[in-house]
Amino acid sequence: MLLPIGVDYETGRAPVATRLLIAANVLVALAVLALRLRSGDDFVVARVFPSVGLRQDRPDLLSAFSALFLHADWWHLAINMIVLGMFGPPVEDRIGGVRFAAFFVAGGITAEAFDLTLTASQPAGITMGASGAVAALLGAFVLFFPRSNLRLWYALPIPISPAHVLRGTLRVPAWPLILFWFGAAVGAALTGGGTGGEVANCGHVGGFIFGLAVARGSTIVLRSRRRAAAGAPGGGVGSASRLQAADAARSRVERLMDDHGKLAAWGEYERFAALFPESALRLQYQLGLGRILQRRGELEAASSALRRVADHYAEDDRAAEALYMLGRIAAELRDTEGARGLLTRVLSDYAATPWAEAASFELSQLEEGERPQ
C-alpha cells in the first residue's frame, strides 16, 4: 500500500489561506450533513437553496462559486482536501495568501466553465466540488516546483512472515505522478465524453491547464519586472550589470529552495551572500532560511541570514521577528549587551507588532540575569 503524505517543501510562513479554504469546505460539509439529518431528506440543500451548485441548464457566477464548497460525499471531500493540504502551502508561499485564495476560486470557476462548455450536449446535471480548483493547483505546482519530491508512506507485508509488515517512507519526483494523473484525466475525458461517469474529467483538464497558464504568466511577469529593475536608469552600466548578476544569483537560490528545500540551497546561498553583500533574497525566503537555521542550532549562520532581513526589509513588520530572533541568538551566545540592543530595537521600532511583547519579556529575563532558553 502506498499513501502520499506530503511534499518536500519548507514554507517561510504559515499557509493561512490554505487552512481557511480547507476549514470552509469542511464546515460547509458539516452544515449540509446537519441539514440532511434534521430533515431526513438527502436533497434538502437543493430544495432549500436552489441556486447552490452549478447546473448546466442554469449557469451563473453565484452557483459556480457555491459549487466549489459542496461535495458529493465524504470521500470526495477528503481526497480534495488532502491534495489541497499537501500542494497548497508551497504555491501559497510562492504567490501569497490573498493571491492564492483568488487563484483557487478562479481556477475552480474556470474548470467548471470548461466542463460545461465541452459537455453542453449531455443531460443536465449539477456540478459540485473543489476538484477543478485542486486540478488548477496541481498545474501551478508542477510548473513552479518541477523538481520537488512527493513523500509516500508504504506498508508491504512480508510473505514469509504474515505477521510482519515492512513500513517506511520514500521520496519520488512529484511531476511524473502529476502528469500521469493529468494524462489519465485527458484520456477519460476523450473516451468517456467528458464526464467519465460522475467525474467531471473535462473540468479537471480545464483546471490543470488554467493552473499551468497562471503559473507561467506569473513567472514571465516576475522576470520582466526584475529585468526592468536591473536595467533602470540612474546606476550606470556597471551597476546595471551587477544588478542583473545579483538577480540571476538570487533567482537560482530561490529556485533551489522551492525545488529542494531551503537547507538544500545553503551552499548556493553562501556564494550569493559572499558575491553580493548588498543584496538579499526575497523576504519570505530570507526569513524562512533564518528560522530553519536557528531551529537547527546553527546560530552564526542564522544570525547572518536574519541580519539581511533586518537591514533590507526594515519597513516590513516581519523585520521585528528577525530582530527578536537575533536578540535571542545573541543571548544564547552570551552577548548580553548585543541582545539588549536588538530587543530594545524591537520595542522602539516595532511597538505595534506581537514581537514587541515577546521582546519585553526577554529583556526582563536579561535584567534578572537569565539567558533565554
Image (cartoon, rainbow, N blue to C red):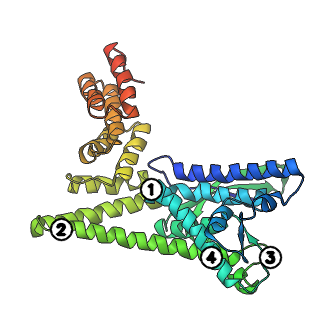
Quarter of the N terminus within the rendering: bottom right
Q: Name the disc covering residue 197, or none.
A: 3
Distance, label 1 to label 4, CA atoms, is 25 Å
The first of marks 4 and 2 along the sequence is 4
Which residue is label 1 attached to?
A: 96
Which residue is label 4 attached to?
A: 113
Tags 4 and 3 touching, CB below 8 Å:
no
Mark 4 or 3, closer to the camera = 4
Distance, label 2 to label 3, CA atoms, is 56 Å
Q: Is residue 151 left or right of residue 284?
A: right
Percent x, y for residue 362?
37, 23
The first of marks 2 and 3 along the sequence is 3
Q: Is residue 246 left or right of residue 40?
A: left
Tags 1 and 4 touching, CB below 8 Å:
no
Q: Amino acid at mark 4?
A: Ala
User: Quarter-wise, where is residue 139 in the image?
Assistant: bottom right
Percent x, y for residue 284?
39, 51
